[in-house]
Amino acid sequence: MYKPIFNQRKALRFRQFSRKGYALFACLGRVVTIGVLSVATLRSAASTATDDLSLSADTTSSSTAAAADDDGPLHEATLGNLEVTGTYAPLGLGQAARMVTVLTRDDIQAAPVHSINDLLKFLAGVDVRQRGPLGAQTDIGIRGSTQEQIAILLNGISIGDPQTGHNAMELPCDVSDILRIEVLEGPAARVYGASSLVGAINIVTMERASEAASPNPPRGWLRLEGGSFGYLAAAGGISLEQAFRTHADSSQIHANGSQTHSFGSLPLRSNLSASYTRSDGYTRSKAGALNGDFEGGKLFWQGCYRYRQLRLAWHAGVSSKSFGANTFYSAKYDEQFEHVAKLNTALQAEASVGAVRMRSAVYWNRNYDRFELIRGSEAKVPFNRHRTDVAGISVNGYFDWLLGRTALGAEMRNEDIRSTNLGEPLSRPSGHYRMGLNRTNLSLHLEHNVLLRRLTLSAGMVAVKNSWNGMPLTVYPGIDASLLLGSGWRVYASYNESLRMPSFTELYYSVGGHKADPYLKAEEMSVVEAGVKFASSRLSARASVFRHHGRNMIDWVMDTREADPVWQSVNFTQLNTTGMEFRSRLSLSGWMPGFMPSEGSTLDVDYCYQHQQKDEPSYIQSQYALEYLRHKVSARLHLQLSSRLDMLMAYRWQQRVGNYTTAEGIISDYHPYGLIDVRLNWEAARYSFYAEAHNLTDCRYADYGNVEQPGTWLTLGVKWKIL
């Protein structure tokens, strides 16, 4: 399902174009087949970054098959268009010293999922804790972290809400808009700043239809779905690039020598998509009312403009969702309700200034949240209302020279909240909002990469200053190393430090049995990791071990000895995590001749083990930090049954450490469970049909205490391509 970044093909090395850090091809960040290299390709590569989508070829084969060098015979090479986000400066696939797991568009389309949240369940190191199916509300953690401790990004722009991490996965884009998902495990402050304590998830959307795998992408698409629990969904999109195609193709040379633009030279491209989902939910309250229902919609616009050395890209999206919150936040009330609305905007620019490649971005995100402890009854319990505004600007650049590739940059991010109960009293209250808080974060980045023939070294640091609580300027360093051993083997090691500022909820939420601490310190993390990778034409595998050392870790804890215990936000002094991961993908192509067409058939098996160590008395109950996955096994079998029919079977088993208090006041441990999902997909030229079965064995389980998840549920869908 996932695609770890491996150096899967042997790269060419010509002595006159060495693979030093200052060499031409190293600067491109790509592996290039010399036999088909052209002046046009060089010109494109020189003027674009490693994620330049104008180089659309996937693979090339050499016409000089007899050529060879010290590394052996000439091999087919990949002209990749994927930028690695494991470092601050972009590097090519074979150069990256840190591993980034990539879920490709093919993975997304094949999986039996309806949301990005469900897709991430297949990664062994990612903890997806659902409070409802189909992405009703989901918390994402990486390697034992909480939902607050990872960065969620859209096209490299942080879209996390400083109010709370519970709503971080309310994305403005549809699953069909996504080109790939990049998951970086471990501290990512060097790359993404002060919100990525234990990892980051970067969602990359398609800015134009021609980024799709098809050489003739459709002008638009429509999708309809229906299933159990009154689930209905409708979505559609249109490529504005393709909408102008007919007019552009009619271009011709005029008598005066001028020429209208052809389709291939259109500098402006954009996509527009919209979606709507609803469900009655799978549960009812004790009074028989809906309490797990949801309804919401999304509208997303993205595009890019290119002119010579300049590239502008933008996205703008709005999303709105209302959902029954069941017993999400309190076991005593089973008719909770929440409404979330978001606006995400960003404008990014890339340009070459001499030998320096410059990148800059400006963005603004607004988030609304209204929580009702008793649905529709504000007279009984006042609603909690929040509005957060996050605005930022970043400038960075990188250049290649004799000793490698150097990158430096800066980002300023302002976070502001207006609330009914979070923050300090406002001097000028407005509407429902009587409280508020404003803070500014400044981060400075510096990184250098040494790119040798078999060895990649990447070292850097981020310096962070936050205006809240008088935080001093603090430096967090990191270093990564990767060594190619030959014959598909590579070893790597890294040490990185990171931090996270407390959310506004952790600082000020002191209602409904909670007591917050406005003087919480920033969390800090240092991680050591080492691993080995192997890649061949049939098998790719990776094994790693890691050790996390957390300082001032934040969690909500309860002293169960008290007569009327409350949840308190506190800084843990230390929290240590030791773990290991194993990931593998086996290609089944050619293994079952005569049985079924196996081209494209794969078997993935992943496993993650973790152990957290924190000396806490048995009477202390933790809400997040000491609830983690001790074991997680994930296996996926993808079979190409025919040229049009394929099937994916997915199995996931996990054991969670921790306990929760039931509505009756009984402390109960989490129980391990295993789930089986199946998807059948029939693909034609202009349409496809699919059927999905989730939780095929009707397992009863809970990711959060007191919120039991549904048993077996089915979905049917159809998608049309508008050519």
Image (tube, grey):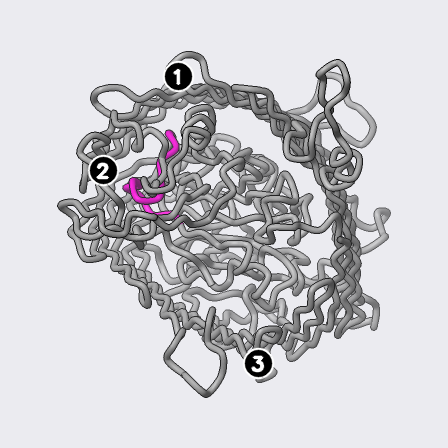
In which image quadrant can residue 578 be found? bottom left
Disc 3 versus disc 2: distance between alpha carbons?
A: 46 Å
Secondary element type, mark 2: strand
Residue for badge 3? 699
Q: Which mark is residue 356?
A: 1
Q: Is residue 441 left or right of residue 497?
A: right
In depth, the one of 527 and 22 nearer the eye is: 22
Q: Amino acid at mark 3?
A: Cys
Q: Which residues are magenta?
A: 89-100
- In percent of width and height, residue 538 lies at 33, 67
Q: Residue at x 61, y 29 (%)?
A: 313
Q: Which mark is residue 537?
A: none
Disc 3 versus disc 1: distance between alpha carbons?
A: 56 Å
Are circles 3 and 1 on residues that touch, CB within 8 Å?
no
Residue for badge 2? 456
Q: Amino acid at mark 1?
A: Val
In depth, the one of 214 and 718 nearer the eye is: 214
Q: Examine the structure image and report whether residue 94 is included in the region drawn in magenta.
A: yes
